[in-house]
């Protein structure tokens, strides 16, 4: 039987042992919410571009804006979101602020996403 092009069982039977085993491994609701929120951050192409830029070098807002042909205000806004979600970090050098990836996990997430779409 198919419901909306999804195959279903011909008869209703809950496999309690499987349901319990999976349920025992499920993260709590707060963690699942936080995970969904982080993936929302990756859902913006401008933020993805910024992350790719920061793969290559630590950069200031002016440099990123020039490279992406965008205004500094738009870049600052996106960097603020990335920083709030701990995907980028900043370092002050005099009056300049330089941004870089927060850690290697960010690169891994992006690379795995790219691998997936290139399959």
Image (cartoon, grey):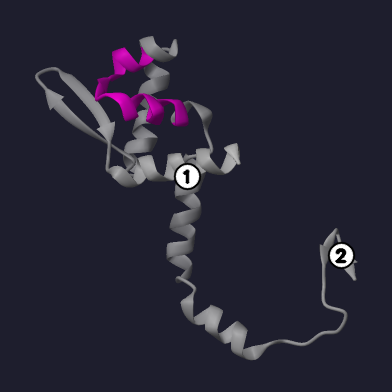
Image spot of residue 101 (x, y percent): 29, 36
Image spot of residue 25 (x, y percent): 47, 77
Residue visible at 54% across and 79% down? Answer: 23
Quadrant of the snapshot with the C terminus: top right
Q: Would you identify the image quadrant in which residue 97 lies?
A: top left
Residue visible at 36% across and 42% down? Answer: 106
What is the magenta segment's predominant secondary structure? helix
Q: Would you identify the image quadrant in which residue 4 lies?
A: bottom right
Question: How many neighbours does mark 2 have within 10 angstroms: few (below 14), some (14-19), or many (20 or more)?
Answer: few
Residue lying furthest bottom? 17
Of tags 1 and 2, the one toward the viewer is: 1
Quadrant of the snapshot with the N terminus: bottom right
Q: Earlier in the sequence, mark 1 or mark 2?
A: 2
Q: Would you identify the image quadrant in which residue 57 lies?
A: top left
Q: Is residue 62 above or below residue 34?
A: above
Disc 2: which residue:
3
């Amino acid at each position: 039987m198919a419901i909306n092009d999804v195959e279903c069982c011909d008869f209703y039977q809950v496999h309690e042992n499987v349901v319990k085993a999976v349920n025992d491994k499920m993260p709590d609701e707060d963690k699942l919410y936080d995970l969904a929120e982080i993936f929302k951050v990756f859902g913006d192409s401008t933020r993805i571009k910024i992350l790719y830029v920061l793969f290559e070098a630590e950069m200031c807002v002016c440099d990123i804006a020039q490279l992406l042909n965008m205004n500094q205000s738009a870049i600052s806004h996106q960097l603020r979101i990335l920083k709030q979600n701990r995907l980028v970090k900043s370092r002050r050098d005099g009056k300049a602020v330089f941004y870089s990836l927060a850690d290697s996990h960010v690169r891994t997430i992006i690379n795995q996403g790219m691998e997936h779409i290139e399959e």
